[in-house]
Image (cartoon, coloured by chain):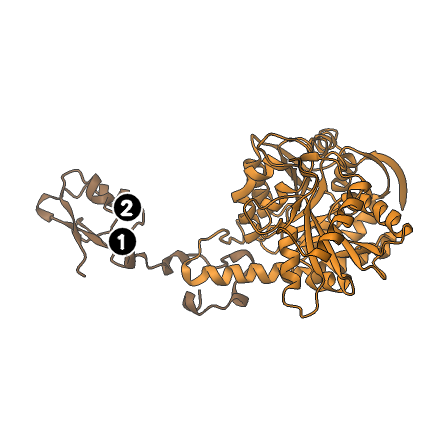
Amino acid sequence: MTKPMDQYTWQEIEIGGVLTEPGSAREYRVGDWRSQHPVWTKSRCIRCGVCWTVCPEAAIMEEPEGYFDMNPTYCKGCGTCARECVTGCISMIPEEE
Amino acid sequence: MAHRVGMEVSIAVSHAVQLARAEAIAAYPITPQTHIVEHLSSLVANGDLDAEFITVESEHSAISACIGTSAAGARTYTATSSQGLALMFEILFIASAMRFPIVMTVANRALSGPLNIWNDHSDIMAARDIGWIQIFVENGQEAFDHSIMAFKIAENHKVLLPTIVNLDGFILSHVVEALEMLDQETVDKFLPAYHPRFRLDTKEPVTMGAFAMPEMYTEMKMAHQMALTNSYEHILKVWAEYGKLTGRKYQPVERYKTKGAKVLLLTMGCLSEVAEIAVDELREAGVPVGLVKLRLWRPFPFTDLRAAVAGAGLLIVCDRALSLGGAAGPVLAEVRSAFYPLSSRPQILGYTVGLGGRDIPPEAFKEIVAQAQMEAQKGPTQEYHIFGVRG
């Protein structure tokens, strides 16, 4: 989209809401919805990548040494990574008010 | 160019769809729509219609498959009735919001319960707000004509909305009538091949059916609302073009002996022909009564209706469905809303008639006119009446 969603008039919307450009889901910054976020305890992480695999938003990134962290723009704080982590090294920490 | 035949109306509708060269049909049989899709499946199986006929396990799947074929760019048709339309419910809104020009025949039938397979309009009235163009026909010829015209209306790039042609179950769908068919060459000239605005194509990929955040949902609905409202002028254009071709001219609101009428009946569908007989007989007896027939239900033809009713003192709206616990039947409520803002308006009274196949002969309309005239003098005793109910 060429401008923010809240600036479109009804006349500017393509018929049936068709999106003609790829990758527009990037603009849904769903990280704003988050009430908690995952924190990795590196000492217990075996770098297996299960968290990276199960994240429904693909919002977990691999870091240079093979450890993982969340992408704060897209992580909704669902907690799937913490639930599935093999060693239990991920804790869900509430966002500050 | 045209030839007269005697034919069951359902079969005539299937031939109209054949002449329109539908490319994809997904349907599930349900009384009283069955003969339409049964015959279409024969036409496809015998090689008389080059279309994909998708047999499905339910109406929910039928309309979902129609969305798929329409998204792929095929001219798409389906038909249903009553419970079948109800089972389609959630998908009907999606078909119109995604602006797929699917054409559907609804052979109108009462909704359960109690289980009843006969004719009224409760099925389509429950689906009133699905955002489709909705047309009612009165006889076999109109069913044939509108089945062809619906494709041309729906597929116009300024319209791109799915369209329902309503025909009364059994009392129209199963009746053999004399009607004039068009030949293939004439229909081809009138209705060229469908060119989708967007379609599923790996070479030119697009996203269809994306979700809308609160920032966009209202604008999307407004775009849909404007498309449906503005479809009115294209509907008129298509009907006028077809009128030139065939001599059969259609209007959103049609008038029968309304000139000088002080009392007007308002009907939809094939009850209108019965009401005409009553009007003829009442006129002979000196009662200044006329009839307005509502052909276009969505978009609602406000201006045409107001013009057709101008001059009458009493308008009697005949609904064929109920809005249980509400102020009026769906048509009465709509008509009252249409006249409420006007400083000069007729008295509007409502009668719900012919539920679940209850027969309404001309005598019933005469009785309704007499009752309504009396009530108009004394003042209404209730919001509306269910005509002929015992007890």
Quarter occupied by the C terminus of chain B: top right
Q: Of marks 1 and 2, which one's residue comes earlier in the chain? A: 2
The hue used for chain B is: orange
Residue B6 spot, x, y in % from top left: 87, 35
Q: Up-down: is B122 above or below B231?
A: above
Q: Which residue is mark 2?
A: A55
Residue B132 spot, x, y in % from top left: 62, 51
Q: Up-down: is B366 above or below B311?
A: above
Closest to the observer: B79 or A26? B79
Q: Which residue is mark 1?
A: A75
Closest to the observer: A35 or B123? B123
Q: How many marks?
A: 2
Residue B127 spot, x, y in % from top left: 59, 46
Residue, x 73% and y 51% (percent of image)? B372
Host chain of mark 2: A
Dot 1: element: loop
Write down which chain is painted brown. Answer: A
Closest to the observer: A61 or B339? B339
Residue, x 58% and y 45% (percent of image)? B126
The disc placed on residue B103 is none
User: Is residue B279 in sight in this rendering?
Assistant: yes
Q: Amino acid at mark 1?
A: Cys
Q: Disc 1 vs disc 2: Cβ atoms closer than 8 Å?
A: yes
Residue B288 spot, x, y in % from top left: 85, 56
- Near mark 1 (Cα within 10 A), the count class, few <14, some 14-19 or many ≥20, is many
Give the left or right position of residue B45, taking residue A31 as reference: right
User: Is residue B293 in sight in this rendering?
Assistant: no
Give the left or right position of residue B382, taking residue B36 as reference: left
